[in-house]
Every structure is written in C-alpha cells, then in structure tokens.
C-alpha cells in the first residue's frame, strides 16, 4: 500500500514542542516525503518536504529515519494557530507529481 | 502573487446539469492538479497537468472532464454527476512535477460542490 500511516489525533500544550509521527514502511528509496497542514475551510498548506536528510525551515523540522520507513514532523513551539490536520504525504518517484495523502493527524493545541 | 484562485466557492447542481469549476494561478507554474476531498477525509488526487498536457488521470469517471487551456488556467467540466460526487474540489499548482521531486504545491481554497 502506497499510503502513509499516522495517528488520528494528538494534543499539545501551547509553546511546547510537538512531534508528529508518520510510518511509510513500503516507501522506495527515491520517494519524497511531504508534510502539509489544513485548517478548517482552507486548502492544504505546505509545511516541509525531504528525501533522506533531516530538513529545517521556518515552520518546522523533518526528521527522516535512517531506513526511511518513518519520519517525524517537529513543531518547535506550538501556538494556537498550529491547530490543524497534518498530512504526511508520499510522492511516488517519477510519476509526475503523484502525491498520495495519508489519513492525517488532527492536532489540537491547549493554551 | 502566491495565490491559486478557484471559482465558484460553492456550487449546487442537479444530476442532469453541466457546470464547470475554474482554477487560475499567475506564479508561472507549469504543473496543475485537481484533488477531491470528502468530509473528514484526506484529499485524493484526480488529475495532473504538466506543461498543459494531461500526465496523470487516477481512473476518474468520464463525467469529470479536465481541461487546461493555457499554463495559468485549469478547468474541471462536470456532467451527469451523482450525489456521491458531492465534495470539496481542490486545485493546486507547482513549479513543475516529478523528476527530482515536485517541491511545494500551492492549493486554492476549493470549490464546494453539492449534487442534488
């Protein structure tokens, strides 16, 4: 199965780090991993993506396991605006932009 | 301008109607996408256009007909839909698709379709 596996929901406290896990045990060596988030009544918003190395940007960090069978999205300090559904996505290599969304993790952030 | 604009935001149609959803971007992106999203579910890929040519059709029924008239515009023509086709239809664009990674997709806010 090409889809990724994520917990249905997670809770976090404001200003604490959040680690969102994703399993992709059948991933090939050339498939990228993407993360997007979706707020209610909005389209998905890009967060980060990577292939093998850990990646950082202004929004988050992406830690990819050495065997690439799992990855973790890290939000360093959660804010109330980070409450959203976070999707872990597998990009199928060489299939022209074929991004397959996982079921998503609904993140709630408590003040 | 980093926007993908979708119109209309809401559409109600009968099963015998013909309607179209429109999507526009002015970021110079050469790949455009249609996704379908049912309530509480993740988006599902329908079509990918790369350089104005259809590159991926995820076995979508022929009552959905995509069209890419130019590099900035993407249409989805709808005909003889069923009530189960009611969903949020999302358009997205990216600089390119495939190869060494697609990079960032920019999504519109979607068109919410109700089929009666």
Image (cartoon, rainbow, N blue to C red):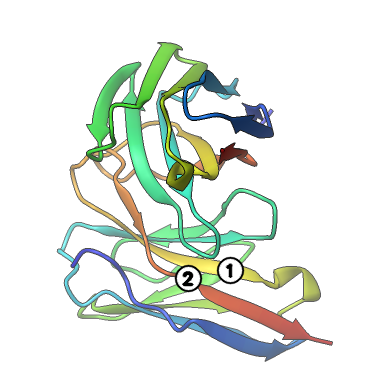
Chain of residue at mark 2: A
Q: Are marks 1 and 2 in contact (CB under 8 Å)?
A: yes
Single out the residue that lies furthest toward the top. Answer: B69
| Left or right of A60 in this view: B60 | left
Quarter in which the C terminus of chain B is drawn? top right
Find disc 1 in the rendering and name its residue: A85
Residue A6 sits in quarter: bottom left
| Left or right of B15 in this view: B10 | right
Disc number for residue A104: 2
Residue drawn at (45%, 45%), measured in percent from left and top? B36
Local SS, label 1? strand
Instruction: Tell me if residue A78 comes above or below residue B54 in the rendering.
Output: below
Residue drawn at (35%, 39%), measured in percent from left and top? B46
Q: Please tell me which of labels 1 and 2 falls first in the chain.
A: 1
Residue drawn at (15%, 63%), measured in percent from left and top? A29
User: Of residues A100 and A52, which is closer to you in this image?
Assistant: A100
User: Could you tell me residue A16's position as x and y percent?
Assistant: 71, 89
User: Could you tell me residue A41's position as x and y percent?
Assistant: 70, 53
User: Of residues B10 and A73, which is closer to you in this image?
Assistant: B10
Residue A13 sits in quarter: bottom right
Can the viewer see residue A76 in this picture? no
Can the viewer see residue A1 in this picture? yes
User: Could you tell me residue B19's position as x and y percent?
Assistant: 53, 19
Quarter in which the N terminus of chain B is drawn? top right
């Amino acid at each position: 199965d090409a889809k990724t596996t994520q917990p249905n929901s997670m809770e976090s406290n404001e200003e604490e780090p959040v680690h969102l896990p994703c399993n992709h045990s059948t991933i090939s060596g050339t498939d990228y991993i993407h993360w997007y988030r979706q707020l209610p009544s909005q389209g998905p918003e890009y967060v980060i993506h990577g292939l093998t190395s850990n990646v950082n940007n202004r929004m988050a960090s992406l830690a990819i396991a050495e065997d690439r069978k799992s990855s973790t999205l890290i939000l360093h300090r959660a804010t109330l605006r980070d409450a959203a559904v976070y999707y872990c996505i597998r990009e199928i290599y060489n299939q022209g932009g074929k991004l397959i969304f996982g079921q998503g993790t609904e993140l709630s952030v408590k003040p | 301008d980093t926007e993908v604009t979708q119109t209309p935001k809401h559409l109600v149609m009968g099963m015998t109607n013909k309607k179209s959803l429109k999507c526009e971007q002015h970021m110079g992106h050469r790949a455009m996408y249609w996704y379908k999203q049912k309530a509480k579910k993740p988006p599902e890929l329908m079509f990918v256009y790369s350089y104005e040519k259809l590159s991926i059709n995820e076995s979508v029924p022929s009552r959905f007909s995509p069209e890419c008239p130019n590099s900035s515009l993407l249409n989805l023509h709808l005909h003889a839909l069923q009530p189960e086709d009611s969903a949020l239809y999302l358009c997205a664009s990216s600089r390119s698709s495939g190869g060494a990674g697609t990079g960032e997709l920019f999504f519109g806010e979607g068109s919410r379709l109700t089929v009666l």
